[in-house]
Amino acid sequence: MTLTTDWTKPGSFSAGRDPLGFQAASVRLYTSLVPGLTNVTNRLRYYSFYCWVVWQFENIHHTTKEDKWIEFIRRCEAAIALACQIGDAANALGMAGSEWWRYEAADTSKKSFDLITPTNRPGEDGQYLKAKYGNFGQFYTASMLEMGLIESASARIYAVSGIAGKALAVAVQEEHPEACALLLKAVQAGRISRSDCETISEALHPSYLDPSSHEAMLLKQFLQGSRADDPTAEARRSSLRNVLAVVSDSSGEYDLRRELYVQSGILGGPSHGIENLTRWRAYFLNEFCHIALEVWLNAIVGVSNQLAGPTTVEALAASLATLAVSDGNASTENLAASMALKSLGEEHDLGAELLAAASVKRMPETSGVTGSTQLIFSLWHRWRKATQVRDELQQETVEGRSVEGVFRFLDLNSAENARLTVAKLIKKFVVSNHLTIAGQKLATGGRFTYRFTLDDGCLVDGEFGEYTYTQPRIANLLTFARDAHLVDEESGIVTAAGAEFLNAA
């Protein structure tokens, strides 16, 4: 097959979630820290439910016809989401189709529900879920393959794995035979009654996992990384223990992101996976630097828009550097030393302030521009000689697009004038990186993500953007810990089972 580039077809506009190419390093870091789940695999019990669904399809249909699988998985998902909405809507958050069924399920006069109309047009609007292969195909397949719970039977059809996946499927079936039979009956008929929904919810609701059941034991083996044949086990176990340590250490409200960066309390102890914590720090360093550069990205657009006509990149970078660095005589190293924040907590808090500045489409205040300088310089001053953290960053850096690339740039310019260093840094890591990333997205995906373009060396057509942190799966990891009764849902306190796991050698 010959592929040619179509230069005449207009690209569809997209805001672009990674306009500087820095989030890619963050994603590579957190993917290895919390493997086996994603930001959208948000209920632990879906893993056992999907093992059971895949197993039932194998047993009932004996086919690899894709249309039969699409019908089966979509009806199963719609049925379980409806059942849990009827049984306990308040605790059914994160289930695919919950929003679709919310109002219909709340109508207590309705005693029977159609499962065909909301599921029979995959890929179209007006369905419980637009994704053709359902929530399973869009969000869970890759994780379950990675963990060895399922295996490919054909291009889009799967089978449960010989040991782990089959064990989960059998546990669901044997412990909840009535609910499973009712669900299969509904899928076959394309209709389900309210009373059957209540029975199914009571047995299979993601918030009703019986901690003493065999299903719960198997799910905790996955979550706690105790399956010897699971290649994702060790990293997830370490991250879970560190998340539970934060919860255990807290006396009320806590910020997981902040605590995993600061690493105070029992997280500082020798038993809490120094390699895991070092890698978490590397992730947060990249996030802080990235958001500071995003503030500068909006700022250079704002400076450009304030001027009467097209202005060269050199002049714009110099103008923004004057805002960013008030001392025109200090060297890079001396300015970094004078701007260095006293604590890790202060660095995190400044990052949070800059996040607020970057998350709106407007010219940042001068405090945001100078704050970005302070955060980048403070991070470099603190971590420039931390070889372990920098090694972790180096592994995930592509073409210099990460905080490690910025650190190397500052290393090389440590004796230079700080204002000139910032001007060059803006040209390289904001202007050049953005144009490179936006060009790659346009060429490969047809997405027009330019926040500005160049015309004869002048920056033109600037648009502000909204930027935020990446979401590193820790919120879902904590949800899984609650689902597995390692953290009490109501009190937020680590349970006896969670403490046992946390304190294990």
Image: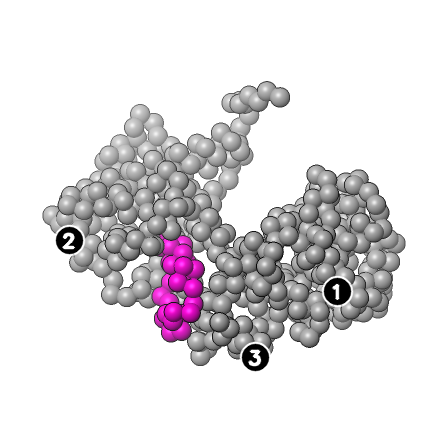
Which residue is label 3 attached to?
496
Asked if the residue under mark 3 is in contact with the one under mark 1, i.e. CB atoms within 8 Å, the reply is no
Figure check: 321 above or below 265 = above
Label 2, secondary structure: give it: helix
Residue in the image at 45% along x and 71% along y:
246
Q: Which residues are magenta?
A: 261-286
Residue in the image at 30% along x and 30% along y:
458
Whether residue 223 is visible, yes or no, is no
Number of the label disc, if any, that sits on residue 171: 1
Q: Quadrant of residue 375?
A: bottom left
In the rendered image, residue 443, in percent from the top left (x then y), is placed at: 49, 29
Which residue is label 2 attached to?
334
Lateral position of residue 441 relative to residue 182, left or right: left
In the rendered image, residue 266, in percent from the top left (x then y), is placed at: 40, 73
Asked if the magenta segment contains residue 274, the reply would be: yes
Residue in the image at 34% along x and 27% along y:
455
Lateral position of residue 174 relative to residue 47, left or right: right
